[in-house]
Amino acid sequence: MLSYNQIINKIDQLEEANILLSALELRVFSIIEKQSVSAKQVAKDIKVTLEGAEVLLNALTAMGVLTKNTNGYKNTHVTYKYFCESSPDFKKGTVMLKMDGCSEYVSLIHTIKYGRNLKEFEGEDDPIFRNLFTLAMHERSEKYAAKLAQAVTQKKVGKLIDLGCGPGSYSVAILKKDKTATATLLDRAVAIKVARKIFKNQSVYKRLNFVSGDLFGDKFGSGYDTVLLSNIIHIYNTSENKTLFKKINKCLKKGGRFILYDMFLKNSKVEPYDAALFAITMLLYTKTGKSYTFSEVYSLLKNSGFTQIKKTEIGFGSSIIEAIKS
C-alpha cells in the first residue's frame, strides 16, 4: 500500500516527465550534440526565449540529464548516445513513442468517462508512425529477447512463423539459439521493410522468410512446427482472438507448439503491476484491446483445439504461454 507521501511523489514525477518530453520535442540533445553550448545559443537554435531555454537547461542539469560548465551545457554520455539524432545509437522509435504517449494520456479522463473514440481508429495505417513504432518495438525487445529465446529453444523450434512480427527481433533471437530453425516473418508491409533493414547484414538473414500480410485477411500457410504470437492478443477482443487462434491451429502440424508472449494478468486483474497499468495503455491505444488474464487465454486456447497449456514468467510483467495442437 502506498503512503500519502508516496502517492504525492508519484504525481510529482509528472513534472520530471514533462521536462524530459519538452527537451525531446525541442530537440535539445540533438542541438547540443558533443559540444558545450550556451543557453543563448540553444535558445537561438530551438527558437525559444532565452529565459525559457535557461530554465529548461538548468532543470535538465539538476536532473542529471545534462552537465554544466563555464562554456555552457553538455550532454551526458547517455543523452548523447540515445537521444541525439546524430548518434548511431539514437533511439528514434522509442523517442517517438514516448512523445506520442504524452498527448494520449491527456485524454485519459475523457476516455474513462465516455469510452473510446472509435473514429480515431478509422482510415489506413499511417506508414510513418508504423515505421517508427516498429523501430521502437525493436529497441524495446533488447531487454526481453534473450530470455524469451532461452525459454522457447528448450525444445526444437523447427519451422516457425512469427505472426504480427513487427521488427522480427524475437524470432531472430530464437534462430540465433537454435541454428537449425527457420522463421517466416509476417506483418504489414512497412514493418516487414523495417525488419529486412535491421537484419539484412546478419548471418541469420538467410533463414528468414519475409511476408507482407494481414493477420485476419491472409492465409498463413501450413506445416509449421512453431507459431509465435508476441504482444498481439492485447490489441483485440475475445472474439477476434478466437478467430485468430483457430487460424493458428490450422497452420500448425499436429503436436506443434503455439507460443504466446504478452503481459498476462492474474485473476484479480491487479497483478502483475506492469500488466495492470498496461490495461490503461490498451484502453487508450486500441479499438477493442485489453490486458488478458491467464484464465481467459487458457479458455480461448482450449476452445481452439489446444492442450498441454502452461505459463512461464519471463520477467518485467511478461510471460510465455505455450500450448500444443492436439
Image (spheres, rainbow, N blue to C red):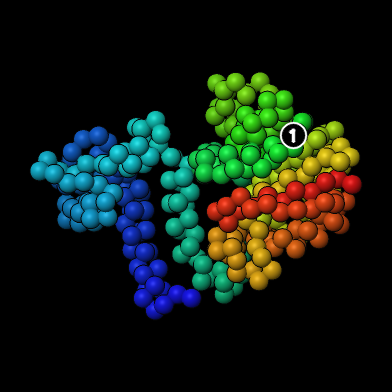
Which percent across, then down, holds residue 217? 78, 43
Residue that appears at 71% across and 48% down: 260
Residue that appears at 27% across and 42% down: 76
Tell me if I can see residue 212 in this picture. no
Q: Around disc 1, counting alpha carbons within 10 Å, would you say few (fewer than 14), some (14 to 19), or many (20 or more)?
A: many
Which percent across, then down, holds residue 98? 45, 51
> Looking at the picture, which amino acid does disc 1 mark?
Val
Secondary structure of the residue carrying tag 1 is: loop
Establish if 101 lies above or below 257: below
**Taking 248 as reference, is 117 left or right?**
left
Establish if 217 lies above or below 291: above
Which image quarter: residue 251?
top right
Residue at the left extreme of this rendering: 70
Residue of label 1? 157
**Taking 203 as reference, is 239 left or right?**
right
Q: Which is more toward the observer, 294 or 137? A: 294
